[in-house]
Amino acid sequence: MSNAAPRPRAKTTSPTTEPWALSATEALAAFRSKALSPVDYLEALIGRITAEDERINAVTEVVEEAVTSAREAETFYTNATDDDLAEAAAARPLLGLPVIAKEKHAIAGRGLTQGLLHERDTTADHDAAIVSRIRAAGGYIHARATSPEFSCATITHSPMWGVTRNPWNPDLSPGGSSGGSGASLAAGFAPLATASDIAGSTRLPAAFTGTVGYKAPYGRIPGAQPLAADWYRGDGPMARTVADAALLAKVMVGVDPSDHATIASPGFLDGFDPAEAADRLRGRKVALCVRLGDFPVGKDIEANTRAVASALESAGAHVEEIELPWTADRIFETAFTHFGHLLAPAMRAATRSHEDTLADYTLRFMADAEAVAGRRSFYDGLAMEAQIQAELATAMDGFDVLLAPTSAVAGLEADASYLDGITIGADGVGRESRDDGVRLDHYWQAHMTMPFNICNRVPIVNVPSGMADCGIPTGVQVVGHPYDDVRTFDVAAAIEVLNPWPGLAPL
């Protein structure tokens, strides 16, 4: 493996004492020691949203009743004995923590639009399964985050919500579809967020905002029917640290009667200790694949990925560079066969007679997916998926994890729709214009996440890898074997220790 010197890091400002800057685990420790009131913490986060969201536009609404949950938590911590605290840590591990929810995750009595103008008067009659689990664990939803229509784009703008911008560089997108969640975390609006992922919608925003995103293996975390039966999809957590992502993931996993695909996950992440993750690297076998075939990876992204691999090797891991026989075109064709037979019909059914109100990228997504499905049968798609899954299994044989960039393109324009392909310029930004640079027919071919939705039994954690030349973070995917979440989180946490990251954008 060739070594690469670490690229310049984002400048870490002097430590702040502002409560909104605390991680979830830090906030919990402060609650338990009575150094911080859950009410004061919530007020600090709401104040941060009020002060900064006008520039970012990541929040659709603040949930007023959150203050009741914060007061209940404050009363508990004020009066708790050591035994009470120990019991709460086991039974209610999120007690007092605010979580920002992606708007698609239903909250009873509140709007459920998925960013669609014609659904602006629709309200949910029950909580999403993961929202119920957050509440049961003592957490609560204090705000809701933007997403593109139907979560079908890797940018986050819509006629419903407007343009969401990246707090690291407002000219660029925080990614999508969980872009509001990623931007909110990087801006200090919340310590934890909900997200979803059907083609990279958790990992891409995590990469572009310098946060952590976990794509769970299919079945780990319950979703909403009927599309919970789509084996590409999955809900999950985002956070600013690997430990925080694991904290929320533990709450989300497990069998739920509303989702027949869910699997039992007893002892999920037992044995994962982020404090010792770097010490457990010695002897780990890491496969490094920079291009996943022929993805046009930018020089800054490649350098950051190689620097992470070198850090792992220096800490005692065995890193070997491998190749995969994939092409961006084959991955696109496979995934859009799937989308054309499953997701596009669902989108058509939900938007019939409202086409004139839809975003241009939504119309284009449906048309592109239907066009691919028109030339490839559902069975053709399954056969193509099986081949890709077998190729990944062969490539990872003998390794503990696979390490790869999250996106080949370093950034996307915040208000672009990429209807006519994408040009990747010298600065790594993908633009709609046809200026000099690498030109791709479809902007989805610039992202390296879809292969692992095709292979959707593998766990993946995105962690920051450095800064891109365009001024926003880059990320790497740590890919595990099917349902081997502990080793995946272990290596991700080790990267975090070896490659420290400030977590918050310098607003």
Image (cartoon, rainbow, N blue to C red):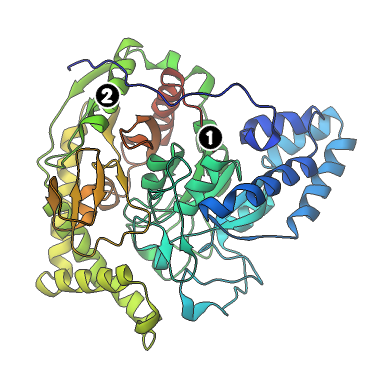
> Closer to the observer: label 2 or label 1?
1
Tell me, yes or no, whether the two marked residues, 2 and 1, touch with CB atoms within 8 Å: no
Element carrying mark 2: strand
Q: Earlier in the sequence, mark 2 or mark 1?
A: 2
Q: Is residue 447 visible?
A: no
- In the figure, is residue 219 to the left or right of 331? right
- Horizontal and vertical percent position of residue 42: 73, 45
- Horizontal and vertical percent position of residue 379: 15, 67
Locate the C terminus by quadrant. top right
Amino acid, disc 2: Val
Give the number of the disc on residue 395: none
Look at 40% across and 47% down and name the residue there: 205
Look at mark 2 in the image and give the residue it sits on: 286
Look at mark 1 in the image and give the residue it sits on: 504
Amino acid, disc 1: Leu
Cα distance between the residues tagged 2 and 1: 29 Å
